[in-house]
Amino acid sequence: MKYSFDDSFDNEFIWTELYYLEFEINLGLDCLKQILSSSDVWLTKSREIFLEKTKKDKILTTEVTEIKVAHYNDNYQRNEMLIDNLQILQGYSLCQSITSFFESSLKNVSEKVQSEFKSEMQLSKKKFMKIEGYYNYLIKVFGKVDIEYDELYQSIMKFYKIRNIIVHSGGISISGEKQIIVSSNDLNKILDKIALFFNKLLLHINNKYYEMKN
């Protein structure tokens, strides 16, 4: 798909295709951040309504402990558990969406590069390539970016390990002792790292493009 742009870009590129890649990546990241923000607002509001309702319940404020506990369990416990579980599932769902977005974006960049440069180094013809395949392919074509880029990649891959535990073990740690919690803070941090990762990658490709064409 081609887009109409205004005059404001994050970067200036020699290879025009990089503008489209940057636009699509930034758009996807903005969508994920908006989903996260909207979910947080909804969950916060739901919890506030729940707490306000319990505060107004006279039985919970006047009766003896045993009666209060029984009343709470009968009337509120399920709703409390519902909100807690929704928060966990929100984290799990966005974790999977973010990792899927990262993988598809890296795949898209790799395929654009292969098409443009007609390099002797080709992507694997396997139907399903692992993320490492795209990462290593781009290094083979353009060389390493910098240390921070490698560190960002390692951080993102650690996040993938969490994703795998969620998908294959329902979020229960390998030891089976506890359930993994993915917080909004965790999600925002990884989105920022992915944004910086692609910014560095596209600028690196652009610089190498200039060298190859001159």
Image: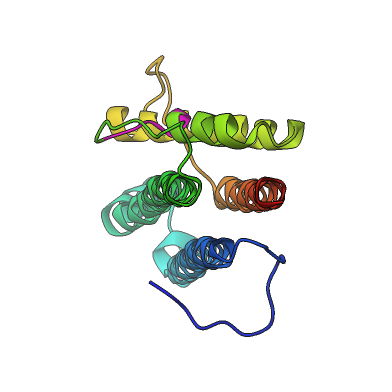
Please give the name of the residue rendered at 29% of the width and 29% of the height, measured from the top-left corner. 168
Provide residue 76's location: percent of width, then percent of height. 34, 58
Residues 119 and 13: in front is 119
Residue drawn at x 70%, y 37% as measured from the top left:
145
The answer to which quarter of the image holds residue 54 is: bottom left
| Range covered by the magenta-colored residues | 128-132
Asked if residue 48 shows in the view, the reply is no
**Hey, which quadrant is residue 138 in on the image?**
top right
Residue at x 48%, y 38% (from the top left corner): 119
Decide: is 3 above or below 141.
Answer: below
Q: Is residue 176 magenta?
A: no
Q: Position of residue 158 (x, y in %)?
A: 54, 29
> Image check: 179 left or right of 151?
left
Relative image position of residue 157 (x, y in whole percent): 52, 31
Q: Residue furthest right?
A: 147
**Prevailing secondary structure class for the magenta stretch in the rendered image:** loop
Residue 183 appearing in the image:
yes
* Quadrant occupied by the N terminus: bottom left
Q: Nearer the viewer, residue 181 or 69?
A: 181
